[in-house]
Amino acid sequence: MAGVDLYEELTWRDMIYDGTEGLRDALAAGPITGYIGFDPTASSLHVGSLLPVMALARLQRAGHSPIGVVGGGTGLIGDPSGKTQERSLQTMEQVEANVAGIRAQLSRFLDCDRPGNPARIVNNADWLVPMDLMSFLRDVGKHFTVNYMLAKESVRRRLEGEDGISYTEFSYLLLQAYDFVMLFDRYTCTLQMGGSDQWGNITAGIDLMRRLRGAKGHGLVLPLVTTSAGVKFGKTEAGAVWLDPKMTSPFRFYQFWLNTDDRDVVRYLKFFTFLGRDAIEAFARATAEHPERRDAQRALARAVTALVHGEDHVQRTERAAHVLFAENIADATVEDVLMVFEDAPSTELALPADGMPIADMLVAVKLVPSKSEAMRLLKSGGVYVNNVRAADERARLTKADAIGGALFVLRKGRKDPHIVKLRD
């Protein structure tokens, strides 16, 4: 993709919310270096961070040099942008652990060994932590009036609230501005990108670079992603959807994208995949003509899961998904079953050598309150074992009936699954 018109590419993908004057010409004039900062508020990025990550990846694919800045320094302070209350301060140890996690995730998207325009992943603690207060006040604070800072939306919004803003978070804008100067000094970086809530911080950095270095910087902000229902992107009933497989399993991650609303799927294909215009337009037509097939959602889930977790996890999650709909899952793997039902309640149970009556097992795992209720439910056909309706209320379940000899999936009705893990 080197040599591609990046501005045009981002425009048709609806990824430009605003930009500084002359940005398009600067991108077209030749390779430039651009950066995006990521605050280490957790040890993992979540799907809400994917749009800026993809912006950096597209920057590199177009022949420019990307820098991912993990805010080990600014993370000790906290960004007030988009926040109505003061953040809780993290310890140095927490921030360092979070920085390590985020660096590893960024390296999946950015090629640090690419000939000609390798990516860099840096930590702003390298220059912010050693800086003393007097130097900060003289070299940075001197160039900003309080009136200028009060006019920034991130600050003004907090001042309008009940709690106001501390001097600590009030200073965040200056620290981020200084990042831009340091990246210019070290890597000739002249572009900063971020979410639309970062516009004030970005323009402050452009101003400081002009004052201290006499250099012209540029800014580009991306839209904040919401669903067509007006819900903040990435927020689910189970909480945030993380990139770390230990925090959000690849199966649940895949399902998140597969469940995308028809009204959002084409936009998300533009944002979060490297599919070209022709392919995405074809999926747009397919969604309009045959929405029940969910071809676009499946392509989206496959592409993003492969990017974040690898192609092998795509195959595993799609194989495991059959467990949800198969009429008999006795031949499924234990790993696939546990992946699908990771949120279902479970009970460890020691099974006698000659097995256990189904009714007794239902009572033992508390799916029903009594054996009489279990018998009633069995007689009415309301119990399923490994997705198969239990036809004989007197039957016994043995280890040979268990999936992989290790577990059962019991259901009261088609819903309410309960995992029984056999204990030796």
Image: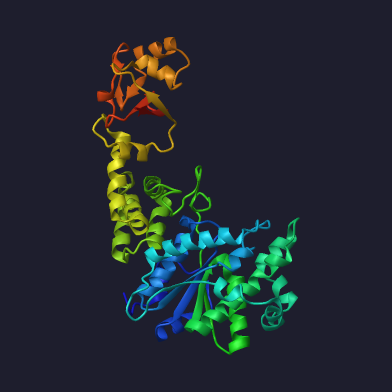
Q: Pinpoint residue 256: horizontal percent, then vertical percent.
A: 41, 47
Asked if residue 139 is positioned above or below residue 244 in the image, the reply reads below
The location of residue 224, given as percent across then percent down, is 52, 61
Q: How is the image coloured?
A: rainbow
Of 90 and 50, the residue lying toward us: 90
Q: Residue furthest bottom?
A: 214
Q: Is residue 201 above or below residue 249?
A: below
Instruction: Please give the count of numbered marks on the rendered protein.
Output: 0
Residue 99 seen anywhere in this rendered image of the structure: yes
Locate the C terminus and report the quarter of the image it occupies: top left
Residue 14 at least partly seen: no
Q: In the rendered view of the protein, which quadrant contains the N terminus?
A: bottom left
Q: Residue 379 location, x and y as percent?
A: 35, 12
Question: Quick one: 268 or 234, which is closer to the camera?
Answer: 234
User: Which residue of the protein is positioned furthest toward the front in this rendering?
Assistant: 424
Tell me: 270 left or right of 326.
right
- 3 relative to 338, above or below: below
- Horizontally, residue 196 falls left or right of residue 117, namely right
Residue ID at (64%, 71%): 173
Residue at image point 32% right, 12% down: 393
**Vertical comparison of 183 with 85: above or below:** below
| Horizontal side of residue 267 vs 127, given as left or right | left
**x and y, in percent, of residue 43 in the image:** 50, 56
Task: Kindly indicate the quadrant of the structure image that contains residue 398.
Answer: top left
